[in-house]
Amino acid sequence: DVVLEIGPGLGVLTRYLADHAGHVHTVELDRSLEPHLAELPPSVDLHWGDAVTLDLAALQPAPTKLVANLPYNVATPIVAESLAGLPSVDLWCVMVQRELADRFFASPSTKAYGAVSVLVQLAARRTGFHAVSRTVFRPQPNVESALVAFRRIPLPERFDRIKPVVVAAFSHRRKTLPNSLELAGLASRERGAQALASLGRPATSRAEELAPEEFVVLTEAL
């Protein structure tokens, strides 16, 4: 396996991964951690920079597993972009804020269900979930966390076209889906209503009512 680790910190997990994987790419933004990462095993490539902006798809050998302890503010873009942007990755194991972990595999018509729920569920199936109390961290954060694992399934065709439709649909949660699509410049209200009709859905439908698979059909109809 080739593991991509985001945020090695002091390198404790990095060294463990190096003992069990063929190769490890680890990405760290904080240069103050450099003394702790100075003597990593030879199978580890250390990359300094922001994981959100680095060209992770160019890493060689290409990563097959993604492991990360992600801050809330970057967890969504990193996970969402890796679904299609890192096609070689077939397994994710990430520690995130509990609220986000619940969103990844939330059901339609629930408060937690959103764009990231649809995108993750179209690309992966959850294989593990473990709640982690704030009391195990030092310093202790103000939020609960969760370790969540999910494995890739085949991406729908034209996933690159589905993603902007999903993002636009959830950009205005209180508006009907045709209105949200029109505000994003993706389709007129009339066209949006016609696309919903092909799903057997009324024009008054909102994004959170549609299952992930329905967004695939909706995009095709548009």
Image: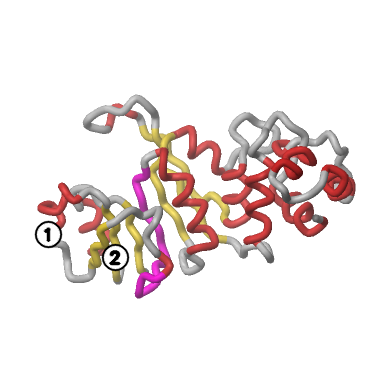
Q: Mark 1 = which residue?
A: 38
Question: In the figure, 25 relative to 110: above or below?
Answer: below
Q: Regarding mark 1 in the picture, which secondary structure is present there?
A: loop
> Is 41 on the left-hand or right-hand side of 25?
left
Q: Residue at x 82, y 46 (%)?
A: 188
Residue type pointed to by label 2: Val
Q: Residue at x 46, y 64 (%)?
A: 89
Residue sitting nearer the eye, 159 or 44 = 159
Which quarter of the rendered picture does the C terminus lie within?
Answer: bottom right
Percent of width and height locating residue 108? 69, 37
Q: Determine which quarter of the picture holds residue 70.
A: top left
Q: Residue at x 68, y 56 (%)?
A: 162
How many other residues sit within 10 Å of disc 2, few (<14), some (14-19) or many (≥20)? Answer: many
Residues in magenta, as a range: 58-70
> Is 126 on the left-hand or right-hand side of 173?
left
State the mark number for residue 168.
none
Front: mark 1 or 2:
1
Query: Mark 1 and mark 2: span between their CA atoms?
Result: 15 Å
Q: Residue at x 30, y 66 (%)?
A: 21
Q: Mark 2 = which residue?
A: 24
Q: Regarding mark 2 in the picture, which secondary structure is present there?
A: strand
Percent of width and height locating residue 64? 42, 66
Which quarter of the rendered picture does the N terminus lie within?
Answer: bottom left
Residue sitting nearer the eye, 172 or 102 = 172
Residue type pointed to by label 1: Ala
Report if residue 60 lies within the magenta region: yes
Residue sitting nearer the eye, 201 or 183 = 183
Question: In the figure, 127 relative to 155: above or below?
Answer: above
Question: Does the CB distance between marks 1 and 2 fall below 8 Å?
Answer: no
Percent of width and height locating residue 146? 42, 38
- The total number of labels drawn is 2
How many other residues sit within 10 Å of disc 1, few (<14), some (14-19) or many (≥20)? Answer: few
